[in-house]
C-alpha cells in the first residue's frame, strides 16, 4: 500500500499557521478554506512579536476513507510552550479533525516572543486532504464511459460499467493494476483493449483514485445512465454509419 502520509507545517507567521501541503494531494479550493479559517481565528500580536511555533506535524490521511477532508484547530500556548487549550473549530470530517488534534497536542511548541521574553498567545493549525479527482470525473476523463458506453460495439465491445458492482474493492484494484478480471481472465494475454489500458495507464492511478472510481461505479452509476450515454453513439459515429462503414446501433 502506498504511503500517503504527509507533514503538516505548523510554523506560524503573524499568528497564522501555514496550511499543510500533503505532497501531491493539495487543491487550491481546500487551501482557500484553510486561509479563511486562519484569517478568522488568528490572534492580534504586538508589533515586533514572533508567533508561537510547532515542530512539523505528521499526518496519515490514508487511514481515512475519504479523498477530501478539512480541519482547523485553535490552540492556546503559554509562556513555557505548553498547550493550555486546543479545540476543533471547523471541519467537514470529524475523524480527520480528531487525528489532527491528537497530533497537534503531541507536537513540541515554542512560545511567542516579544523583546526576548515569552508570552502566552493563540495559534491556528489547519490541514487538508485533497488528493484524488472525483470518481465521476475519472470515469469520464480517462475513457471508462467512452469505451464502455459511447463507442460503437463493432469497434469496442466492452461490457456495461455496471459489471463493476460485482467486484469487491480488492478485485477491482487488481483489475486496474493488471488487467485480470475477478474470474481470472487475463485480458492482456487476449489482446483486449482493457488489458492494455489497465497495465499502461490505470496502473498509474493512486490508491485514492482507484477507490474514488470504485465508489462512483458501485454506488452512483446505473444501467439507465449507461443507456443514456449509448444514445450518443449514432451522433458520435454518424459519418461512419452514413457511409455504411458501421451498422446503426
Image (cartoon, grey):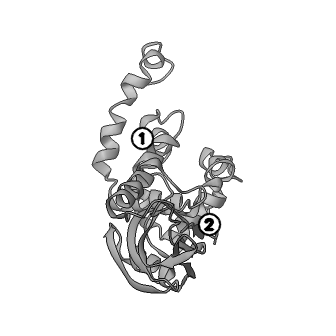
Q: Extreme left residue here?
A: 224
Near-viewer residue (122 or 49):
49
Q: Which mark is residue 180?
A: none
Across and down, in percent, residue 221 comes to 34, 53
Near-viewer residue (207 or 107):
107
Across and down, in percent, residue 219 comes to 34, 61
How many numbered circles are shown?
2
Q: Is residue 209 left or right of residue 55?
A: left
Across and down, in percent, residue 131 comes to 51, 57
What residue is drawn where x is 63% and y is 47%? 197
Q: Is residue 236 visible?
A: yes
What residue is drawn where x is 58% and y is 73%? 116
Q: Nearer the viewer, mark 1 or mark 2?
A: 1
Tell whether label 2 touches label 1 (CB within 8 Å): no
Q: Which image quadrant is residue 86 in?
A: bottom left
Q: Say which element carries label 1.
A: helix
Q: Is residue 174 left or right of residue 124?
A: right
Residue 26 vs 143, above or below: the answer is below
Q: Extreme right residue here?
A: 189
Q: Residues within 10 Å of mark 1 (few under 14, many from 20)?
A: many
Residue 227 vs 102, above or below: the answer is above
Identify the image quadrant of the C terminus. Answer: top left
What residue is drawn where x is 47% and y is 67%? 167
Near-viewer residue (123 or 56):
123
Q: Which residue is mark 2?
A: 184
**Alpha carbon distance from label 1 to label 2:** 24 Å
Q: Which residue is mark 1?
A: 149
Q: Is residue 215 left or right of residue 118?
A: left
Q: Earlier in the sequence, mark 1 or mark 2?
A: 1
Across and down, in percent, residue 101 comes to 43, 79
Amino acid at each position: 500500500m502506498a504511503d500517503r502520509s504527509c507533514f503538516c507545517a505548523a510554523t506560524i507567521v503573524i499568528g497564522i499557521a501555514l496550511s499543510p501541503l500533503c505532497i501531491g494531494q493539495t487543491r487550491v479550493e481546500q487551501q482557500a478554506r484553510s486561509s479563511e479559517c486562519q484569517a478568522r481565528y488568528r490572534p492580534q500580536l504586538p508589533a515586533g512579536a514572533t508567533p508561537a511555533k510547532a515542530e512539523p506535524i505528521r499526518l496519515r490521511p490514508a487511514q481515512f476513507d475519504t479523498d477530501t477532508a478539512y480541519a482547523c484547530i485553535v490552540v492556546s500556548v503559554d509562556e513555557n510552550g505548553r498547550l493550555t487549550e486546543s479545540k476543533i473549530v471547523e471541519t467537514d470530517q470529524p475523524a480527520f479533525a480528531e487525528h489532527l488534534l491528537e497530533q497537534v497536542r503531541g507536537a513540541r511548541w515554542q512560545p511567542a516572543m516579544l523583546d526576548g521574553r515569552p508570552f502566552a498567545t493563540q495559534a491556528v493549525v489547519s490541514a487538508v486532504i485533497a488528493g484524488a479527482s472525483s470518481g465521476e470525473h475519472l470515469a469520464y476523463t480517462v475513457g471508462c464511459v467512452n469505451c464502455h458506453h459511447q463507442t460503437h460495439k463493432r469497434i469496442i465491445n466492452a461490457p456495461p460499467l455496471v459489471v463493476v458492482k460485482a467486484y469487491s474493492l480488492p478485485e477491482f484494484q487488481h483489475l486496474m493494476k493488471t488487467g485480470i478480471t475477478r474470474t481470472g481472465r487475463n485480458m492482456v494475454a487476449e489482446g483486449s483493449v482493457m488489458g492494455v489500458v489497465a497495465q499502461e495507464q490505470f496502473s498509474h492511478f493512486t490508491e485514492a483514485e482507484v477507490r474514488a472510481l470504485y465508489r462512483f461505479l458501485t454506488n452512483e452509476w446505473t444501467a439507465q445512465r449507461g443507456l443514456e450515454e449509448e444514445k450518443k453513439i449514432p451522433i458520435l459515429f454518424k459519418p461512419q454509419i452514413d457511409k455504411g462503414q458501421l451498422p446503426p446501433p
